Image (spheres, rainbow, N blue to C red):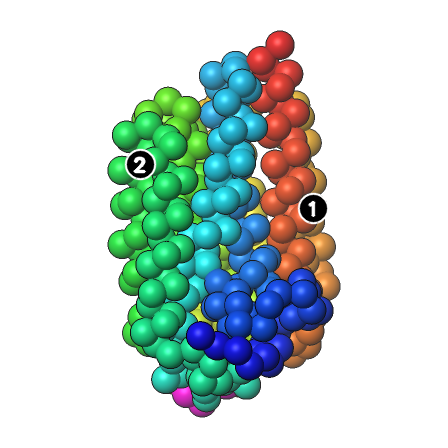
Amino acid sequence: MIIEAAPRVADSTGNWVDSHAPLWTRPYLQLARFDRPIGSWLLLLPCWWSAALAAGVAGDVSQLPWFAALFFVGAFVMRGAGCTWNDITDRDLDDKVERTKSRPIPAGLVTTKQAAVFMVLQCLIGLVVLLQFNGFAIATGIASLIIVAAYPFMKRITYWPQVVLGLAFSWGALMGFAATFARIDPAALLLYAGSIVWVIGYDTIYAHQDAEDDLMVGIKSTALKFGERTHTALAVLYSLAVLLIGGALFMAHAGWPAWIGLAAFAAHLVHQIVRLDIKNSPLCLKLFKSNRDAGLLLTAGLVVDAVLRSL
């Protein structure tokens, strides 16, 4: 059992883990990124989009609060499991990157075996959540684990690891339809595609924090691939995300609140591109985190639309 205090991870700010969690739990909570929950929110948002859009198609929001709660728990737990797996596989790289060398495994606060046990525990909690859905949704959720397992290795072999991250982080865009209808509609596929492109965009912003260190240790990313062309690349990626998500709304016969939500989402993405300075790491982190707010704007529009269509 770890009893010493865990140092604050480099890209973490003041939070309940650092200030209130029992000392022995802090390295594990850091492994699961509970000190930095933005990734959990970004994993959750496509789930909520899909659940709300599916509820609108069904004209029934009676299950939406329950699904939203399940997705909330599942996203936070499974993002924690994924991050733990990532830290296990990256343990020999993290100590070479300034932002990650203070993570629990390279800092010596948790052994690889302890991290693996913790990861399995999180997966079991995630399985309990998944079992609350129908059989088709359960199978769909389990299928995502293949992508999650592969992701940490992609940065070693391709400049496009963000594509694989997008495949994993956007999986929830399929889950709302799977849970509601026990099938995946064309609207869900378009929503999934749009979310993937969105993830590639925002994680490119995030990756610019580590660009110099990544170059030295041989880690690949779209930040290095795009370089000074990042603004142009983001304009293309974010435009495509909005168009694909708009296609999903069209296929689902969404009403005006959903379109307003999409417009607000799009305006937020434009704001990110305008403000971005790839040489300013704190700003990159701030803009990356702001994607939670962008996603919540779209969520609000979809939920209002679902409620109105259920009346």
Residue nearest the observer in this picture, 300 or 100: 100
Local packing at callout 1 (Cα closer than 10 Å; few below 14, some 14-19, many 20+) is few
Q: Earlier in the sequence, mark 1 or mark 2?
A: 2
Q: Mark 2, residues whose alpha carbon is within 10 Å: few (<14), some, or many (≥20)? A: some
Can you identify the residue that label 1 sits on? 267
> Residue under circle 2?
138
What is the quadrant of the N terminus in the image?
Answer: bottom left
Residue 230 % position (x, y): 56, 68
Residue 4 picture location, percent across and down: 55, 81
Which residue range is magenta in the image? Answer: 213-217
Establish if 295 lies above or below 122.
above
**82 or 251: nearer the eye?**
82
- Residue drawn at x 34%, y 44% is 127
Is 36 left or right of 174, judged from the image as shown?
A: right
Give amino acid for label 1.
Ala
Of the 4 image quadrants, the one containing the C terminus is: top right
Residue sitting farthest toward the top: 311
For numbered disc 1, what is the local secondary structure? helix
Rendered view: 253 above or below 33? above
| Type of secondary structure dominating the magenta stretch | helix
Question: Which residue: 58% across, 73% down?
Answer: 23
Tag 2: amino acid:
Ile
Q: Residue at x 46, y 59 (%)?
A: 80
Q: Quadrant of residue 163?
A: bottom left
Q: Residue 287 has which mark?
A: none
180 inside magenta stretch = no
Secondary structure of the residue carrying tag 2 is helix
Q: Position of residue 301 (x, y in %)?
A: 65, 31
> How far is disc 1 from disc 2 in space, using C-alphas?
35 Å
Please state which of residues 179 and 272 is positioned toward the viewer in this rendering.
179
Q: Reply yes or no: does residue 216 show up in magenta.
A: yes
